[in-house]
Image (cartoon, grey):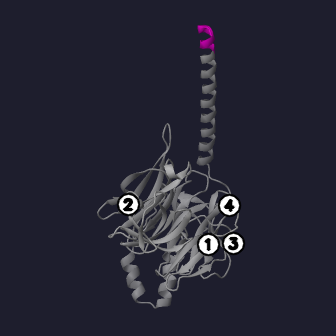
Amino acid sequence: MSTRGRLALLFVAILALGGVAVGSVVRASARADQRDHQQDGGPPVTAGRVTLSVADDAPQQQQDRQQQGQQDEDRQQGQQQRLVFRNMLWGPHRDELVSVPAAQPAGARTASGVRCLRFYAAGGGGICLQQASGVLQDTYRAVVLDADLHERRHFALTGIPTRARVSASGRMMAWTVFVSGDSYAGGTFSTRTSILDTRTWTLVQSLEEYQVIKDGAPYRNVDVNFWGVTFADDSHFYATLGTGGKTYLVRGDVQAKTVTTLRENLECPSLSPDGTRLAFKKRIPDAPTDAPWHEYVLDLRTMRETPLAEQRSVDDQAVWLDDHTVAYALAGDYGSDLWTVPADGTGSPTRLATAALAPAVIG
């Protein structure tokens, strides 16, 4: 090809790339325009103060509770509790953490200005898994938040955020990300689960560093994966272990750095507030490959499983709103909605909030 021909070809290529770039800018502008306008049909969302504190006037509330009976105390607690979650409504506050009264979950939302893909909070602290848009690719980080949603520290993530949990005291935090590139994964995603002690800032980069005890004996396999941590206290937790094409419920010991298998076919456990039961998703034989899970509750005292009334496939780590109610996310018009169901297998699913994800109960 002549020099003139090569120059002409280069010119055409530049024009084509320019067209792609312009198209990308136009699409990005359209998305930005969609983000900047409040979506019709959802609850109002306005900027304001969001806190992870139980209550700003806690001393007075404690004094009031001491002067009332247990029934009034329970009623007041329900009125004072709040839900903080990721807002999925299109508009200027999409992906921000918002707060609503627990007694009015479908009501007006107060937006914090802090954006998270995944979030959880307890004990006056929170973990926010964020996305940072880059020129060549997006990056992710785990941000430790104080009660006023200010950053205490952050840690780079090696993959796409999928799960987050905090111990009741707020000291221990855990998160799971999807990663690619593991040789054993055959081109599919695997997981990395990290645990952080916010008192000492000791970070376990991957639970794969822990010793696995399976069927009473030490176990090693290159395909070991962990996800879905839920804390029993600051020293112990439950999680999912995946290996050999199967999943297991494991109990972890932070000091001993061990995880011990307890039960097969159990994913994304979530411990009840009273510490006696685990909500989890279970893979059902002969279920559709794109909808394989059913939500259950496991009684840790009897090891009896109770199927919950939700018949749709739940691909989420459930959250306990109280000792009797489980919340989880399902696909919705704006990305996802939050639903609830009784934890004893009775009743029927109820929509808790539209356009919402990753809730935490505060109070």
Q: Earlier in the sequence, mark 4 or mark 2?
A: 2
The residue tagged 1 is 295
Residue under label 3, please give it: 311
Q: Quadrant of residue 5?
A: top right
Start-end of magenta stretch = 1-8
Task: Tell me, yes or no, whether the two marked residues, 1 and 2, touch with CB atoms within 8 Å.
Answer: no
Q: Position of residue 310 (x, y in %)?
A: 66, 73
Ranked by sequence position, the earlier of labels 1 and 2 is 2
Q: Residue at (50%, 37%) from the top-left corner?
A: 136
Residue beneath label 2, please? 209
What quarter of the picture does the N terminus occupy? Answer: top right
In the rendered structure, which disc, 2 or 3, sits on the residue that comes first in sequence?
Answer: 2
* Secondary structure of the residue carrying numbered label 3: loop
Disc assigned to residue 289: 4
Callout count: 4
**Residue 249 versus residue 317: which sits nearer the camera?**
249
Compare marks 1 and 3 and give the one earlier in the sequence.
1
Check the picture and name the quadrant holding the C terminus. bottom left
CB-based contact (under 8 Å), mark 2 and mark 3: no
Q: Residue at x 66, y 66 (%)?
A: 313
The residues bearing labels 1 and 3 have C-alpha atoms spaced at a distance of 8 Å
